[in-house]
Structures are given as structure tokens and as C-alpha cells.
Image (cartoon, rainbow, N blue to C red):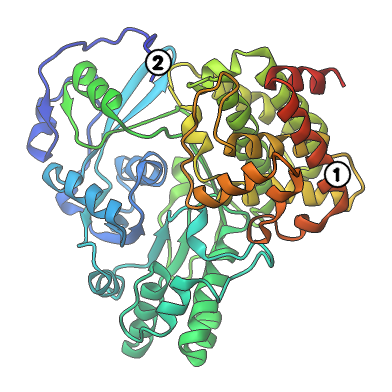
Amino acid sequence: MPDSNPPQPHDNISAQRLCNDALANLPEAVSTPGYDRKALTAGVLHVGVGNFHRAHQASYFHRLFELGQDHDWAIVGAGMMHFDQAMRDKLAPQDWLTTIVELNPEGFRASVIGSMINFIAVDPDALIAAMQDPQIRIVSLTVTEGGYFLSAETGGFDPTHPAVIRDAGMGNSPQTVFGAIIAALKARRDQGIAPFTVMSCDNLPENGHVARATVLGLAQLIDPQLAAWIETNVAFPNSMVDCITPATGPREIDLVRSQFGIEDAAPVVCEPFRQWVMEDSFPQGRPSLEKVGVEFVADVAPYELMKLRILNGGHAAIAYSSALLGHHFVHDAMADPLIAGFLNKLTVEEVLPTVPAIEGVSLTDYIAVVSKRFSNSALGDTIPRLCLDGSNRQPKFILPTIGARLSEGQSISGLALEVALWAHYCAGFRDDGEAIKLDDPNAARLRERALAAQSNPLEFLAMPDIFGPLTDAPEFKQAFAAALQRLQNSPTRTVLADYLAS
């Protein structure tokens, strides 16, 4: 977070270790649960208890409980990865409570939320058993964009993924979240228990459809009859989720301790903006989330495209250009006229025409709000976070927009430059010569392809699992090669300035 945080009312006060017993002793400025947490009962099992889930979904549930509503819809946390165990170890001593700090430049606001009442053991058998509980009517997911076993070449489920092949042959011992979901649904079917709804909260176009395709694809490999039953009986609503949530580090932990008097092992800082748009498809019922601002609509797709292409695509647009120029904080990058100008020109000229109109929503106003959110100096969001996992994010947030533009015969000069900036970043050095550490599951291959592209730019596109049909799209190849060669021969600032002047 930036060192220029606005002054807060509780600097250097004595800190209380967060737990149920400490709630009554926290400073008055800290909002604490006004409901009886002991009276809450589970209704949702959530897989992937990271910062975003707690800043977003868990916060909406907390606000609903504050209204005295739907106390039978509390959240049970779950996970299957090593980092899930680390989160469980942090949250257990504090009774599953989380401190959320909304970073508004005009003043920070802290709330302790209590909507999660348990976090089951990080173990496949424990997860399957918990999902069989009839009280669990929704299983929700934040397992990242790369966790759905998608093929870049087809856009659909990838039955050749090693984890899928392993689960398909494991019988009753799945090692993936989706294998566990299938095992739990089978058990519920066999016991005559109504199936839960699967609710994806990940940043994916039509995330409900994607979750459905992954579950059905894996189930088909395991038990075709079970797959047919799931297809007929299980709902997978689409949703659009939005709240910028930086990673938690020592600065954030110290902020919560020094300014709000809370010793929290895993606090969350986030912007004061949240949005959640969902299809209303919940056969076993749902909490009344519309009372706390969730929008239930017949078709989420236009909202998804708006957010994924303008906000997530915007993050990608500023990520690699800013990293090459040496910016660390997002708000500092947005103060750079070349970065802000690149974002605006790219968004208005090439991205906006691919986003369908939404009744009652001004897309130009949305672009302005996104720019303001990116410029929030209190948020302290970092360029390295935006650069994470490009091999999964580019196919979700940038490449589909390129495909849409090409299908209409439209220019992709700015979008091709964005991909070229990513390729140039993957080569491993900023403009000032400082080394770049790639944080990506495919880091070694990306570096290899980026270095090969120094002799032939098209070498970077020789990854069909990432670029899909764009690997062989002549217009894209030509525009990308030209952009990458400009970056290889001129400073990033010069290339951006030339683009803005074009």
C-alpha cells in the first residue's frame, strides 16, 4: 500500500487478537457483527477462501445477516490446495472472523465480518462429506480462471488435462474440486437428497456455463449415467463479480493492527466498490441477497462482457506497459499520461465496440468509473499483481476481444500492442535493464518463447494452448509482429507515444 495513506483515527492503539471474545473490546469505529453468530447455520459451502471471496461474497452475506435475514445461509469454507490449508490455519484461532478494510482515499473503514462459521479440513474426503450435508444448498467457487480445465484451442472443457485424466481414473478418491463435487452429487442422488446449486464466482465469461461444462465433462468420463442426471437436475447460474482486492502482506497486517487495534492474521483490504450480478436459478432456494445490492437478471452475459473486457482487460492493458516502465503501484501508473492515455484509447476505440448495450447502464460512465477505481491511491494495488498468471488471463480478458474485432474486420492495432507488451515483458527485462521475475504457471515456456521472438516475433504465438485459433490468424500475426518489433527496437515510452499519436 502507498506510504501516503490519509491519517486515520486509531494510530498506534493497543491491538486485540481477533476472535469472538475480543469483539466487544474493539474500537468503536470498527463495525462488528450485530447478529448472534452462534445462531447461524450453514447453507453455503465455499471452495477457495481467498481475499476476493471474503471482500465480496462473504461481505454481502454479512450485510444480509446484519438485516436479521436468512441466518440459515452461513458460509462453510473449504479447499483442496496447500494455500487453503494455510488460510485455514490463520482463520481457525480467530473463530473464522475476518477484518475487511475499505480503502477510500477520504478515510478508511474497518468491519469485522462473521458470515463464515466453519472451515472444513483440507482433505478430499472431508470436502465430499461436507457437501453431502442436506443443509448445504449452494456450493460456490473461487478457484481462479485457470482452475476449470479449459482448452484454449476449443474454448471448452479439456479432457486431456493431466488432473482430469487422474480424477477420471481415481474412482471414489478424486483430487480436484470438480471430482469432489461429482462424488458429492452422486452420494446425494443415491441418498435421495436434493442436489446443491453450483455457483461459480470466478472471473470467467459465462462462469456458470463453464462450471457446468467442467462438471459434466469430468462426470462423463467417470459415469455417463451420473453425468446425464447432473445435466438434468443441477443448476449452474452465471454471475458477474467485481471488487478490486489486493494481496495481503505485512503492510496490510500492520495497517489493521496500528490503525484499528486488531491483530488479524489474514485481514483483507479492498476498494469501497462492489458489484454482483446473477441469474436467479437456485432450485433449492437462495438467500435474499437483492436486499443488500445483488442484481438478479435474466441474462448476465452483457454485464460479464462489460466487466471482463473493460475492467479486467483494462488491468491487462496497464499491467505490462507499466511493468516495463518500472511502475510498482497501479495508481502511480494511472498518473502517467502515457499509461492512462493507452488505456483510454484502447478501451474506447477497440474494446467498447465489442461490448453490447445494457439497458439502464452507460458504458461511457462505466469506463470513467473504472479509471477512477484504478487511480485510487489508497488502495495500493500493485502492478506485479496485475501481471500475475498472464497465460491464463490473456485468453480470458484480451484474446476474445481480438477475435471479436477480427470477425467484424476491424482494427486491432491497440490490442495487438497489448499482447506484444506482454511478450516483451516475458522476455524478462524492464526498459531500465532490471530483471523481471515471471509469476506464471507457464513461466519457463513463456520466457523461452519470448526470447525466441527476439529473432522472429511469431515464435511467441507458437503456443496454441494459449492463443487458440489466433495462432494462425494472418491479421493478428502481422499486427502483433509489427508491434513487438517496435518494442524491441524502441523504448516502451516511444512506442506508447507513437500509438497515442496515430
Tell me where residue 48 sits by quadrant: bottom left
The quadrant of the picture occupied by the N terminus is top left
Q: Quadrant of the C terminus?
A: top right
In the current view of this chain or complex, which residue is farthest to the front? 455
Judged from the image, the secondary structure of the residue bearing numbered disc 2 is loop
As shown in the figure, which amino acid type bears the numbered disc 2?
A: Pro
Describe residue 40's horizontal placement relative to residue 278 as left or right. Answer: left
Spatial distance from mark 1 to mark 2, Cα to Cα?
Answer: 40 Å
Depth order, front residue of 479/233: 479
Label 2: how many Cα within 10 Å (few below 14, some 14–19, many 20+) = some
Look at 52% across and 90% down and name the residue there: 224
Q: Amino acid at mark 1?
A: Gln
The reply to whether dot 1 and dot 2 touch (C-beta < 8 Å) is: no
Residue 248 in picture, x, y percent from top left: 32, 33
- Residue 497 position in % (x across, y down): 77, 17
Which residue occupies the foreground of this view, 213 or 290?
213
Secondary structure state at the residue bearing disc 1: helix
Which mark, residue 478?
1
Q: Which residue is mark 2?
A: 2
N-term mark: 1 or 2: 2
Q: Nearer the viewer, mark 1 or mark 2?
A: 1
Q: Is residue 183 above or below residue 141?
A: below
Near mark 1 (Cα within 10 A), the count class, few <14, some 14-19 or many ≥20, is: some
Residue at image location 38% in from the left, 39% down from the top: 55
User: Residue 113 appears at what percent x and percent y?
Assistant: 27, 39
Count of picture labels? 2
